[in-house]
Image: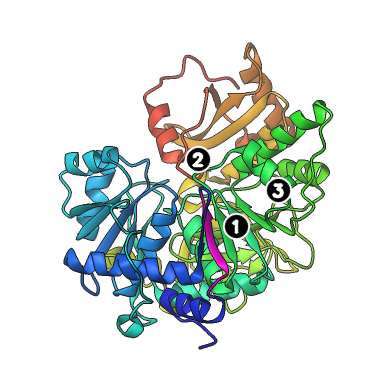
Amino acid sequence: MNIPFTTIDALRRAAACAPKRTFVQFDGQSFSYEDTAVLAARWASRLHVAGVERGDRVALFLENSSAFVMAYLGAHLIGAIVVLVNTQYRQTELRHILSDSAAKVVIVGDQAHADLIHRSDAPGVVMFASEAVLEGAGDMPDWTHAPAPADLALIGYTSGTTGRSKGAMLTHANLMANSAAVTRAWSWTERDRLLLTLPLFHIHGLGVGLNGTLFATGTVDLRRGFDATDVLDTLARGEATMFFGVPTMYTRLIAEARRRRSEGRAVRVDGMRLFVSGSAPLSPQTFAEFEELFGHRILERYGMTETIMNLTNPYDGERRPGTVGMPFPGQEARVVDVRTRQPLPDGEIGEIQVRGPNVFAGYWRNPQATAEAFDANGWFNTGDLGWRSADGYFTITGRARELIISGGYNIYPREVEEVLLDHPAVAEVAVVGLPDAEFGEQVVAVVVPAMQTTDGLEQELIDWCRARLASYKKPRRVVFAAALPRNALGKVQKHVVQQQLRQVQPERTPQ
């Protein structure tokens, strides 16, 4: 077996060709591919005893851990479908996801999470991840009941940045096709060691980080979470070749590196070959600062729950700041007019559509949403706005739902945000549209200031935008906040920003 078509194919291949190679290192323990196969078999047996059968849903309400990895593969070994659950979710969100997916079993890491499940009144048997799975003699799995490529592997609920989450159905073929494309594009091999601090309940951490490592038969150094000091210490020791992060992680690494330099301490990452960023826009400023400090150009890519990875800057070639590159091998992308749905020429902004073997099978028990997500030729409507350069690089300008139409003009929030971020008094910003009786919508900027005093700053920022953008694009209001609402991966939840703003009546509207 040379090409794995399911996660279990990949595990079986790795356990056969590199049984003693470390697959997962976590919390001082190392698990070889052979160990992983045995532990996955124990999880499969335990789930079977709990009544889980092929096609049943098994929800993982777990922090990063070796148990997450083994339970994930154990569920797949008996043909079950894994449901990923954000550990920050509470009763309302848990009730929706667990009821919608009809999970038969929910695996938790501690009593606090078990109590949350019980209080949510959601269906499913609660099972603890720590119960006796590592005990007893082990045997290699019975591979005969492994899933087929077309079987569902995951239900990943969308991040909910624009409203209530939907369950995206990903097949084993989707996962492996994407892993094949990613490992090829990034020259990922069995010699690589990935330092993974992203949460496994998210498609970035699991679908790219863990599955990519499994496909490449490499090693993953899994951490409970991100800590800038710990990450830089690990990299300085030469214990990783790759790191995947989100923009907020990179800004914290930059801050930690600057602190060390101010103390006269060297910042070295000699063993690293690749830093990857995604899940939220990476600003050109962060890109430049990181290169200056670390000597590496971050590779920015673009993906989503429904498709895993879509676009990437090249491993060999120009990694262009502010862009997300070109389609992965075997995949397609194009830009279409948001109204006519016809393809647009290079340079014009429209909705990005993608097509390929990585694209999900549809939304769980939601045929209407599935039908609306695809066109007649199988192109998936990402809901993201962007444009393509003449030489093929895509640039994301925002979400289609976030497009602001004021006085008949289209305004792309990211364009305004990038101008505001160039002002030294702005640490973070989110630009949204709010209803306006005269213009239909007005541009409002929510700013996290980089200084304590904001006296006169509102008008100063509006003037700053007026001098650099068409007048209709400048904010009509600037609201100051201590922080922006974000999801688990640091993506700003603009629908929450809008809800908060609607509750605040402006005292005045600067011009």
Q: Mark 2 points at which residue?
A: 492
Q: Position of residue 485 (x, y in %)?
A: 46, 34
Q: Is residue 169 in sight in this rendering?
A: no
Q: Which residue is drawn at 26% across and 69% down?
A: 45
The colour scheme used here is rainbow
Residue 323 location, quadrant = bottom right
Indicate the amino acid at tag 1.
Gly
Q: Where is residue 32 in the image (x, y as percent from the top left)?
A: 51, 66
Please say whether residue 124 is one of the residues in the magenta stretch.
no
- Between the residue at mark 2 and the residue at mark 3, the CA separation in whole angstroms equals 28 Å
Q: Mark 3 points at which residue?
A: 235
Labels 1 and 2: the sequence-earlier one: 1
Q: What element carries label 3?
A: helix
Of badges 1 and 2, the one in the foreground is 2
Q: Is mark 1 on a helix, strand or loop?
A: strand
Indicate the amino acid at tag 3.
Leu
